Amino acid sequence: MAAKKIAIIGGASAYTPDIILGLIRHSRELAGSEIALMDIDQEHLEVIAALSRRLAEHAGADLRISHTTDRRRAVDQADFLLPQYRVGGLQGRFLDESIPLKYGVVGQETMGPGGLSFAMRSIPVALELAKDVQELAPNTWWLNYANPTSMVTQALTWSTDLKVIGLCDAPVGMVYEIARIFRYPLEGVTFDYKGINHCGWITAMYRDGRNVLPRLHRLVRWVPAGLIPDERAGHVLRLFQRHGVVPNYYLAYHYFRQEMFQHARYDAERGGTRSQVIMKGLPDLYEHYRQVANAAEPRLTKHRGHASHADLAVEVIVAMVTGRRQRFIVNVPNQGALEDFAPDQVVEVPAWVDGSGYERIPMGRLPEFGADLIRRVKHSEDLISRASIEGDRDLALEAFRAHPLTPSRDVAEKILDELLAAHRDHLPQFRRPTQAGQTT
Ligand code: G6P
Ligand code: MN
């Protein structure tokens, strides 16, 4: 197997060490490969690079870790590109979480107005990056973690011919949680998933070719969901009990809308939106990374996120490098995988991945009871992807109005205007030239 170059854009992220550990676990298949860490945050980049080198060296892994603040250098001849940048950082996420709340709408990183807002910042950077990729690594596999991954992937596949797969660990996350709570073994099972990112359902679960999801359903059907201590798992369980298929937990923002809003507002009032909680914890986490980088026995005991997040990208890379065919849930242009969408619309479905790329597994139609919601969210997201590509404020307004979580046209416009103003510095596409060459 030839050595590869894997470039991580946003390499200083606290998520990176787990990706490195995953790559180290597969270092035999990836022998001789280079992992290029790129970030604009030089200080954290140094920490993550030192840690990564220490971990690789200690494991005796034949991997070379480079780091740079020069995006083009990282991209140059990369075989795999892992963008996980966050435009505007967690401070930007905080604005997306808190501004909609003022208008009675939940604020969230990828869902609702917050997600649309994040798309407006992420997409222009993706398109800039794509120019470098087109020039320096046109054959790269772009494994996109930059959120909101559905909209970023949509914008990229509409605007470029690059090979892009949007990744997310959420679709199966909650099935594992439910299975763990009820001690149901999931080894060796594969899943059907129908929907779009953060908005879809696990509709079947196979063991030895048999759908065993109904069996899990019978097992949990009459359990009082209130007994489940984890709130997210409780929501998922309720919906599973009702419909017999397992929701992506982000659907709670729709199906338990009022409750999710109340919780978000309660957290925000006490200074603890999700991004604030994360920001509070990050200094400790980087301090841990610094210590481990200098330890004789480097061992990570603190992590950002769940291991499945890193494993997914690593396993996709390994399947492509080794040619060992594996099934993953991916975000790719539909091309008939779901009958509810047009060929060019990015959907989230299972696919076989191997040395030649991916092959979608046809999923038929969305579940009847949930189809309308998914279609409406997708419509709104497509509008914002187009608005972000074209810098069209009217289209952005249409997107905000079309989203099922915005209560009225008026409120949609107020939220949009406030978000546009708050994120002004990261929204070059919406800046219009005025007289005297100034921009607004
Ligand atoms: C999951 C989702 C990601 C999301 C993350 C948020 O992994 O799939 O899309 O970014 O959760 O986690 P956080 O810890 O940042 O709230
Ligand atoms: Mn996700």
Image (cartoon, helix red, strand yellow):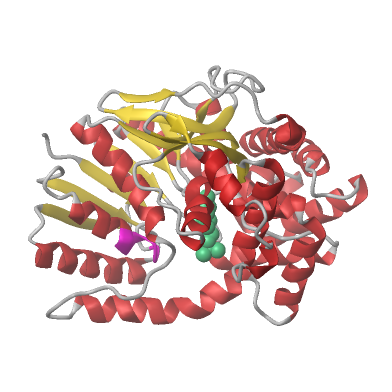
Q: Position of residue 71 (x, y in %)?
A: 34, 49
Q: Position of residue 270 (x, y in %)?
A: 71, 82
Quarter occupied by residue 46:
bottom left
Q: Residue at x 63, y 55 (%)?
A: 237
Identity of the residue drawn at 57% across and 21% down: 344
Of 198 and 10, the residue lying toward us: 198
At a point 14% along the width and 78% down the height, the residue shown is: 297
Q: Is residue 244 above or below residue 184?
A: above
Asked whether residue 166 is in view, the answer is: yes
Q: Residue at x 83, y 49 (%)?
A: 406
In the rendered view, would you say 35 is above or below 134?
below
What are the residue bounds of the magenta stretch? 13-18
**Magenta stretch encompasses residue 190:** no
The answer to if 14 sits in the magenta stretch is yes
Question: Can residue 79 be spotted in the picture?
Answer: no
Location of the N terminus by quadrant is top left
